[in-house]
Image (cartoon, rainbow, N blue to C red):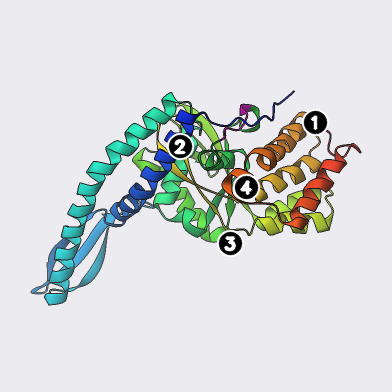
Amino acid sequence: MRIELSDNGMDEEQAAHAGRVRELWTSHAPLLREAHDLRGGIIWKKARGHEYLYRYFQDPSTGRKAFVGLGRRSPETEAEHARYLSRRDEVQASLAQSAPRLENAGRVARALRLARLPSFAGEIVHGFWREGLMDDRLRVMGSMAMFGYELDAETLAPFPIVRGNSLRFLVQGEMDDLLAEVAATLVTSAGRGFAPSRLGHLAFDGQDGSVEFHTAASLATNLRDGDLDEDRIDVVMETMTLPAWQGVAVARNARVVPLVAIDPRACALFALASAATEHDEERAELLAKRARFIGSAVLAKVGVALEPHHADLFAAFEADRHTGRLRT
């Protein structure tokens, strides 16, 4: 399979709209997150002759209404009650203005062929972001991460290197601490009723997609099982600790979503490392081409560069292609 690695830069209209989408999301996102934090309502409840203030909301893990007590009626709780109602009205009014603009921008992006993220993936990453799981606990990796770089780089990856419906996440911290919350969010994400047949697999609106969760340790183990040199594994895994890439993508259903991904340098080096341990030649080629595309058409445009030891490893992997270890 031959994959063209030309620039694939956006045309002037696409690039201008990519900037508009990013700008609109930047102003819309804080409102959306605050609206989620203000979800439910606030009420006074009587108990034993006194009134107490409660916040209520739907618990995503049970689907039931949950209550949080804020204290007995007092000047302080009355002020909290007034602040909540006032701020909720302000946020809803602001969203009523920003949401239609963002939705229209998503539709225009689709018309301009910028809406490339699979819809099921867009719903999931949006749901995880809404619940705060993308803040410091989950990062998109693999082919789906590429969509998080495109609007910033103003370049579109060749479809073969981003093809597929496998949504993979790098987990920060312990996996066990996250799984219950992840499972609940998969079921309720975006209020659209995701129905996983098992954790890591779901069907949504007739579109099947797999969802995988990996820790740095499990990724390193996979590379080690592929007989990759330990020094190379250390360099690759070091890039996984780089700050998350705060990207924005447009899903194929025209929804604009935050796409918090691993750093593009980590994406490139992990793809090369995976190619070096891959026995399927076609799969190895796709991985290597993905890495080369990031190196040639993404990094400079988003203002990052490989550190010298990263570049040395990149060159070493490329050299392996000529010895048969990396068969592309």
Q: Which residue is mark 4?
A: 264
**Toward which corner of the image does residue 309 lie, by quadrant?**
bottom right
Structural distance between the alpha carbons of marks 3 and 2: 35 Å
Q: Amino acid at mark 2?
A: Ala
Q: Which residue is mark 1?
A: 281
Structural distance between the alpha carbons of marks 4 and 3: 23 Å
Structural distance between the alpha carbons of marks 4 and 1: 23 Å
Which of 181 and 29 lies nearest the eye of the viewer?
A: 29
**First reached walking from the N terminus: tag 2 or tag 4:** 2
Q: Residue at x 51, y 31 (%)?
A: 116
86 relative position to 245: left or right: left
Magenta-tinted stretch: 155-159
- The dominant secondary structure in magenta is loop
Q: Amino acid at mark 1?
A: Glu
Can residue 195 be seen here? Answer: no
Q: Quadrant of the N terminus?
A: top right
Q: Nearer the viewer, mark 1 or mark 2?
A: 2
Instruction: Identify the secondary structure beneath mark 3.
Output: loop
Q: Amino acid at mark 4?
A: Pro
Structural distance between the alpha carbons of marks 2 and 4: 18 Å
For residue 129, above or below residue 280: below
Q: Is residue 284 magenta?
A: no
Which of 249 and 129 lies nearest the eye of the viewer?
A: 249
Do the residues under discs 3 and 2 have CB atoms within 8 angstroms? no
Q: Position of residue 45 (x, y in %)?
A: 13, 65
Q: Position of residue 316 (x, y in %)?
A: 84, 47
Q: Nearer the viewer, mark 2 or mark 4?
A: 2
